[in-house]
């Protein structure tokens, strides 16, 4: 637990050349902010006040953030966010951040992809880089998952983020995009909810019905019975 009486170490740095101390260089100094390994479970107000409007890249990995992420709305220009090794779980939600393009969520407590991914897409529609490794919801050989589990997981995540170009440690291929769209077609009503303003009662009904009938991971047998050469991975 971080004590308010302690000075929080703030590592602000710029990847620009430090040979010049011009106004342009000075403005770039606060674009990257690291608060990793600070045992934080909330964001200090003075940090928000000082860096909220200027930071583009924020590293708050190896802390204790969970569902208390409302402070991220104050970092309105954020494009990259590292939340590795925190306590993010299935019920953590993000506020609307249309500028965010890179999100690292490795080694958190995410156990189920749905509705976590749906909420994530609603809040972060322009993600291009996403990492979920080390979570139970992201099966791999390292956590007991099979190749088929991994393939299902990868295609399901891709189906939710049409702008994604990199998932975990691999680039997304054109074949994967095509297969994700084919296997995980979005319900028509789901698309209407995103594009058309609807009453809250209808949105609530839609969420309940989706939770009841939508089963994302049901393709193991289909993959296991396929003997064709795999071109997806």
Image (cartoon, rainbow, N blue to C red):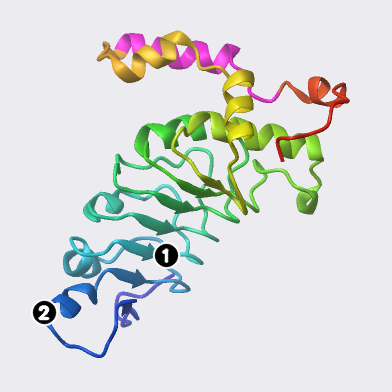
Secondary element type, mark 1: loop
Could you say which disc has been placed on residue 60 in the image? 1
* Residue at point 19%, 79% (across, down): 25
Quarter of the rendering occupied by the N terminus: bottom left
Magenta segment, principal secondary structure? Answer: helix
Quarter of the rendering occupied by the C terminus: top right
* Residue at point 42%, 65% (across, down): 60
- Circle 1/circle 2 CB separation < 8 Å: no
| Residue 216 sits inside the magenta stretch | yes
Q: Is residue 23 left or right of residue 141?
A: left
Please provide the residue range marked out in magenta. 201-217
Secondary element type, mark 2: helix
Give the image location of residue 184, x and y in percent: 59, 21
Q: Is residue 178 left or right of residue 80?
A: right
The residue most toward the bottom is 19
Question: Mark 1: few, some, or many residues within 10 Å (few <14, many ≥20)?
Answer: many
- Residue assigned mark 2: 23
Q: From what the image shows, is residue 125 above or below residue 169?
A: above
Choose top left, top right, bottom left or bottom right for residue 121: top left
Give the image location of residue 144, x and y in percent: 81, 47
């Amino acid at each position: 637990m971080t004590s308010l009486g302690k000075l929080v170490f703030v590592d602000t740095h710029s990847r620009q050349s430090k040979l010049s101390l011009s106004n342009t260089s000075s403005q770039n100094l606060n674009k990257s902010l690291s608060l990793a390994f600070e045992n934080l479970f909330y964001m200090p107000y003075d940090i928000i006040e000082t860096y909220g409007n200027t930071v583009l890249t924020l590293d708050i990995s190896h802390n204790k953030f969970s569902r208390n992420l409302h402070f991220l709305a104050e970092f309105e220009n954020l494009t990259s966010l590292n939340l590795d090794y925190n306590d993010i779980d299935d019920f953590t939600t993000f506020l609307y951040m249309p500028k965010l393009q890179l999100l690292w969520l490795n080694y958190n407590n995410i156990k189920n992809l749905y509705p976590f991914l749906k909420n994530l897409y609603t809040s972060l529609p322009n993600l291009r880089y996403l990492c979920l490794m080390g979570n139970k919801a992201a099966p791999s050989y390292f956590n007991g998952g099979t190749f088929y589990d991994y393939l299902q997981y990868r295609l399901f995540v891709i189906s939710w983020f049409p702008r994604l170009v990199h998932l975990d440690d691999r680039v997304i291929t054109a074949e994967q995009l095509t297969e994700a769209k084919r296997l995980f077609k979005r319900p028509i009503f789901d698309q209407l909810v995103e594009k058309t303003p609807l009453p809250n009662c209808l949105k609530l009904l839609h969420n309940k019905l989706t939770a009841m009938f939508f089963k994302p991971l049901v393709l193991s047998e289909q993959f296991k019975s396929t003997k064709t050469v795999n071109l997806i991975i």
